Amino acid sequence: MRSSLHPRPARRPRPRSRTRSRLVALFTGVAAVGVLLAAGTTARAADAPLRDLAEARGKVIGTAVTGSKLTGTYGDLAGGQFNSLTPGNAMKWETVEPSRGSYDWGEADRIVAFAQAHDQQVRGHTLVWHSQNPGWLTDGSWTADQLSTLLQDHITTEVTRYKGELAAWDVVNEPFNEDGTYRTSLWYQGLGSDYIARALTWAHAADPDAKLYINDYNVEGVNAKSTALYDLVKSLKERGVPIDGVGLQAHLILGLVPSTLQQNIERFAALGVDVAVTELDIRMQLPSTDAKLAQQAADYRAVMNACVAVSRCAGVTVWGFTDSDSWIPDVFDGYGAATPYDANYVPKPAYGAIATALGGTSTPPTGDCTAAYSVANEWNTGFTGQVTISCSGAALSSWKVSWDYGAGQRITQAWNATCAQSGTTVTCSNASYNGTVPSGGSVTFGFNGTWSGSNPVPAVTLG
Ligand code: XIL
């Protein structure tokens, strides 16, 4: 897959691993869960993992990750659903060189190893930025020459460490102000705008195969900032500076996907560079509601469609795939729910939108959730029964079970579910408060009924 998405020689070519095959089998089930939409229709997540859908279209579907979380359900989804990982913080300067000359590659190495074990690309993030730099660097006072040497050493050390292993690097992050002037970062102040060309040149020297990007936010639509970026890329190309792509971070607000997104991607593509959506999240004011989640799905779909429509759009990376691993609530007061999975790893309507934009189909839930019927108590003409719905690798956001009473039983009363009987068929669906069955969890509801003759346990169907 790596070669089909980013043709480049891999330093350590790996066969498709057994782990991966197991994950595919598992996630065929995980993805196939129901998602309740505002209109009352039930959308089903696609039956194939997002990464398989994306691969079939030659696109990247990536996620930012936290290295320490790559186990359990988080690891299963990160490895099973995405074909690219971006370290959320692990490759930033303050993380890799917290004190001068002393390096900590632990989290970055872990993410790269995980990606290789799961046949995924890695997008390096980021080498030159005004933020998340170590104190020793920002507090020092440096001559221009010293600053230039520091930057060259940093880029050379980090890019060389992962040479041949990363598909792309966000070499320069957030160089512009909103009005299109250069941000007065430590780099701009010390070296002028030429720090950008130098950084790209040094990165290229250290890993000539990695795709080198400039990455920024609020450059998704056509505006002053994206036009400044456009002019920069154009002049870098004209000067022969190695620049392969433009990253549109896309930290978006609900309902505000720029209408010029595709047009903007197209104008960059026409310069002869790739475009990637690198940090997509779509935040809403909390609490989330069904209507907001439906709008969010439409917004995710719009972003996906714009990328799918342009062949030079390499793909889309979400900035965290679960609301439990999103930077939004920490930084934007009162906002959250910005990613495709909720905090319990239940896919939101946005997940289905990504899947369908990548050509996924809709199938009913099957997967790793089961329903078990038992008779809890029985007396001369009546009985109490219960059904427990349990999920292992998968999760549900709503559920419905049905069974057939072949021996003439009749339901008279139910709790923790809404039940109806028509002829011999009983159908029960979740109450308003117990639709969610998390991975590794269960929900039980109960009922009373009448019987005569015999009271056998029926076969229960989930879905
Ligand atoms: C964010 C991380 O997600 C947070 O964990 C961290 O505290 C701050 O940085 N633009 C970028 C990313 O390029 O590196 C930022 O990541 C989000 C905005």
Image (spheres, rainbow, N blue to C red):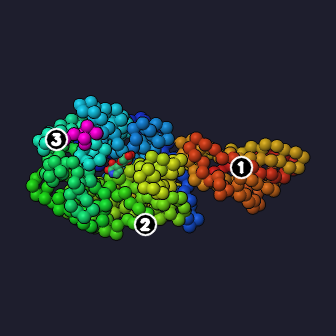
Q: Mark 2 and 1 residues: CB-CB less than 8 Å, in contact?
A: no
Q: To which quarter of the image does residue 283 belong?
A: bottom left
Name the disc covering residue 391, or none: none
Q: Mark 3 and 2 residues: CB-CB less than 8 Å, in contact?
A: no
Q: Earlier in the sequence, mark 2 or mark 1?
A: 2
Q: Residue furthest left?
A: 239
Callout 3 environment at 10 Å: few (<14), some (14 to 19), or many (20+)? some
Is 412 on the left or on the right of 61, as rendered? right
Q: Magenta segment: does it hold 140?
A: yes
Q: Which residues are magenta?
A: 134-142
Location of mark 1 (residue): 445
Picture coordinates of residue 211 (x, y %)?
22, 47
Residue drawn at (38%, 60%) of the image? 252
Residue drawn at (75%, 59%) of the image? 421
Name the disc covering residue 255, or none: 2
* Amino acid beneath label 3: Trp
* Inter-mark Cα distance, 3 to 2: 45 Å
